[in-house]
Amino acid sequence: MWPQFRAIQDSALVSSDQLRRHVQIYMKGLHNVIGAMDDEAELTRILRRIADAHARHGVHQFHVHNMLPEFVAVLYPCLHQRSPEVKKAWTTFFDVIGSLIDKLSHDRKWAE
């Protein structure tokens, strides 16, 4: 579970305002990433901002990887094309975010 949600009981998580806000931010970030796919500088800026925000909250690469199977399971019914390439693309995206998070966390520790 994500660190900021550990204090919330499982039964209350579904109706949690905190989770709802997180999902809205997540979807906005995803929208921004997709919108910047043709602009490498903007895409890099957005990915670093997302990774930095996660690193500040103690999220690590393994948290991101743990979310991938559920994300794909939710996404697949919305897709008309359920190819291995689609899953691989999302896996690569989650790997990039996770790697950046861990790199920023490591850099932050050395800066202290």
Image: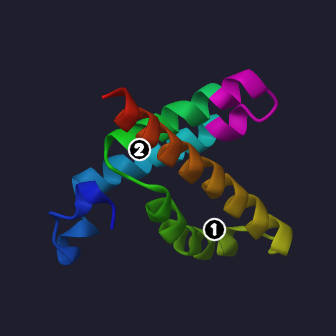
Q: Is residue 51 above or below residue 87?
A: above
Q: Is residue 81 visible?
A: no
Of helix, strand and loop, which mostly describes the magenta segment? helix
State the mark number for residue 49.
none
Under mark 2, the amino acid is: His
What colour scheme was applied to this rendering of the protein? rainbow
Q: Is residue 8 above or below residue 110?
A: below
The kind of secondary structure element at disc 2 is helix
Rendering coords of residue 112 (x, y %): 30, 29
Nearer to the camera, 87 or 28? 87
Nearer to the camera, 105 or 39? 105
| The magenta stretch spans residue 28 | no
The kind of secondary structure element at disc 1 is helix
Horizontal side of residue 64 vs 111, given as left or right: right
Q: Which residue is mark 2?
A: 54
The image quadrant of residue 8 is bottom left
| Residue under the image location 44 percent in, 41 percent down | 106
* Structural distance between the alpha carbons of marks 1 and 2: 22 Å
Q: Is residue 45 visible?
A: yes
**Can you say which quadrant of the picture contains the N terminus?**
bottom left
Horizontal side of residue 16 vs 95, given as left or right: left
| Residue under the image location 42 percent in, 46 percent down | 24
> Bounds of the magenta span?
33-44
| Residue under the image location 24 percent in, 60 percent down | 5
Residue with the most extreme front position:
110
Q: Which residue is mark 1?
A: 75
Under mark 1, the amino acid is: Leu
| The magenta stretch spans residue 43 | yes
